[in-house]
């Protein structure tokens, strides 16, 4: 049974940085990828970054590419999202997610059966 718990959110001024963490327990061998999503008020949940377990490869949404970095601990028990050069439009609830099958359409939240409770990020101008 996979359980995910995010931490590290907070308030920061534009241009600042935050590092989110996602503690993972019950991580099955079949888990194929870990991803970060975000959801702003009245917006759809958006895929931000993903890391594929088999290859270690990563991908990012265009809106965060070059500013955010996804990484993990060696044992895959923690997944991180380093967020630099934050902008007010990055303000959202951030969630980590895990999936056990496939790696396509990583940005589609419906592909992920496991979710954390979220951590809030607020960026002021």
Image (cartoon, grey):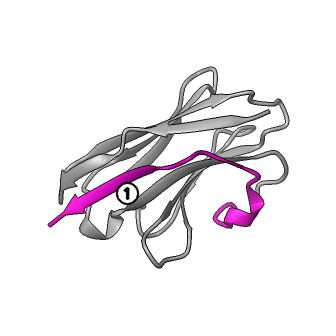
Residue 105 makes an appearance in the image: no
Q: Give the left or right position of residue 63, taking residue 91 as reference.
A: right
Q: Position of residue 103 (x, y in %)?
A: 76, 55
Instruction: Assign a secondary structure to mark 1.
Output: loop
- Residue at image position (51%, 65%) is 61
Q: Position of residue 52 (x, y in %)?
A: 68, 44
Q: Give the left or right position of residue 70, taking residue 54 as reference.
A: left
Camera-side residue of 74 and 4 = 4
Q: Position of residue 100 (x, y in %)?
A: 82, 45
Q: Give the left or right position of residue 102, taking residue 51 as reference.
A: right
- Residue at image position (37%, 57%) is 66
The verdict on residue 119 being magenta is: yes
The verdict on residue 110 being magenta is: yes
Q: Which residues are magenta?
A: 104-125
* Picture layout, residue 17 above or below residue 48: above
Q: Residues within 10 Å of mark 1 (few under 14, many from 20)?
A: few
Residue 119 makes an appearance in the image: yes
Q: Which residue is mark 1?
A: 66
* Residue 5 lies in quadrant: top right
- Residue at image position (74%, 30%) is 27
Q: Give the left or right position of residue 107, taking residue 94 as reference.
A: right
Image quadrant for the C terminus?
bottom left
């Amino acid at each position: 049974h996979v359980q995910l718990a995010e931490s590290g959110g907070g308030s920061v001024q534009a241009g600042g940085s935050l590092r989110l963490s996602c503690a993972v327990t019950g991580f099955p061998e079949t888990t194929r990828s870990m991803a970060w999503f975000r959801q702003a008020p009245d917006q759809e949940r958006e895929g931000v970054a993903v890391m594929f377990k088999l290859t270690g490869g990563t991908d990012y949404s265009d809106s965060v590419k070059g500013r955010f970095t996804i990484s993990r601990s060696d044992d895959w028990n923690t997944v991180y999202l380093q967020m630099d050069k934050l902008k007010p439009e990055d303000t959202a609830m951030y969630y980590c997610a895990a999936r056990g099958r496939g790696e396509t359409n990583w940005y589609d939240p419906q592909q992920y059966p496991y979710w954390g409770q979220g951590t809030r990020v607020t960026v002021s101008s």
